[in-house]
Amino acid sequence: MSAMTPLRRNITLGVVIILIGASVWYLQSIQSRHMPASSSAPVAIQNTASDDRAAVIAEKAKKYPRASEITNPSGFINTDAFHIQDLIGKKVILIDFWTYSCINCQRTMPYVNAWYDAYQDQGLEIIGVHTPEFQFEHDSNNVKAAMQKFGIKYPVVLDNNYGTWNAYQNLYWPRKYLIDIDGFIVYDHAGEGAYEEAEKAIQDALKERAQVLGEQANIASGMANPKNVVDVDAAKVGSPETYFGSARNQNFGNGMQYKAGVQSFALPSATKENSFYLDGTWNIQKEYAQNTTPNASITYTYRAKHVYFVAGATAPTAVQVYRDGVFVKTITVQANQLYSLIDEEQSGAHTLKLNIETPGLQAFTFTFG
């Protein structure tokens, strides 16, 4: 065998060096693909995270109910038709059941609007579910007018058939349900108040959403402080919501309760607190009482500092408001809506009297605050 020349030895040595280098690179590359790293998401870590997430969801399922779907809606305002399921896994959802003539709903609206402004860009969707209490609240034009009046910008579902109301087994206006990123109802509250508690629940749900989706989010920690808010101390309100229609007029002081039809009444010499008394001839219908003669009146002794009146009229109707025999103001009633009658600094017991000069007023409810 002939001796290897220097040139061939150099070439061979170079090839060997190249092969060794390639082998080292290959081994390192294999090692790096299987090395756990907190900054990346290797297969083993992803499976563990998935298992952890499944455990979290399983634990939630033991504690919280699943969100129900929008059911049999009559329409949508501020949005195209959608399903709640389309938002689960993407958004935190606050459902607010309301109806526009409800004073309790109206007093919560500044907070709901403030939450929408503060958190809509951070993953919160608010859905107003408008479930009407009275027949006139079925009219979408009335709802749209109320939304404009109250500055509502979030989507509203018209729930005229009570489909979504029943799906949630709801019984109250207002009622708020908070649905988290996984589709669970993690918080709910009926009625007014608990605003800080509700907002803290929203913030916590948004933080979880950001973590689950891997988003960088700086969720606000402060509390909303909307303007023109009327806070009510329920302990100082001594009068219940009072209905005039035959379906619910158990507080009727000088007439037969639950009886529909045209009846004539006279104001008695003595009246009781938290009962209403009619004077004149009235047509009592299921939802309202309507005066059919001029110079009719309503008398009611209440205990509160605010008095509201849900009413409408067939034509603009002047209603003179008296408190303890002293004239307060005249309001003009026509549109079916909530009217403010008394607005005092302190709660107290007083006698309210409404004089209606012309026929056609439809009285639905008194509410108090």
Image: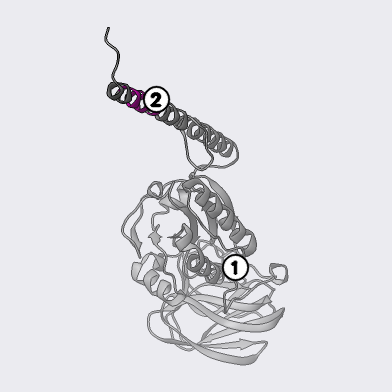
For the residue labelled by badge 1, is the local secondary structure a helix, a strand or a loop? Answer: loop
What's the mark number on residue 20? 2
Foreground: 274 or 49? 49
Looking at the image, residue 87 sits to the left or right of residue 268; the answer is left
Q: Give me the C-alpha separation between circle 1 and circle 2.
A: 89 Å
Residue 224 vs residue 80, the one in the foreground: 224
Q: Is the N terminus in the top left, top right, bottom left or bottom right quadrant?
A: top left
Mark 1 crowd level (few <14, some 14–19, many ≥20, 10 Å Cα): few
- Say whether residue 170 is visible: no
- Which is more N-terminal, label 2 or label 1? 2
Q: Find residue 171 and report its image quarter.
A: bottom right
Which residue is rendered at x = 64% and y = 73% of the image?
231
The magenta-colored residue range is: 12-21
Label 2 sits on a secondary structure element that is helix
Amino acid type at circle 2 is Ile
Q: Residue 241: which disc?
A: 1
Q: Residue 101: horizontal and vertical position, in percent?
A: 48, 70
Outermost residue on the top side: it is 1
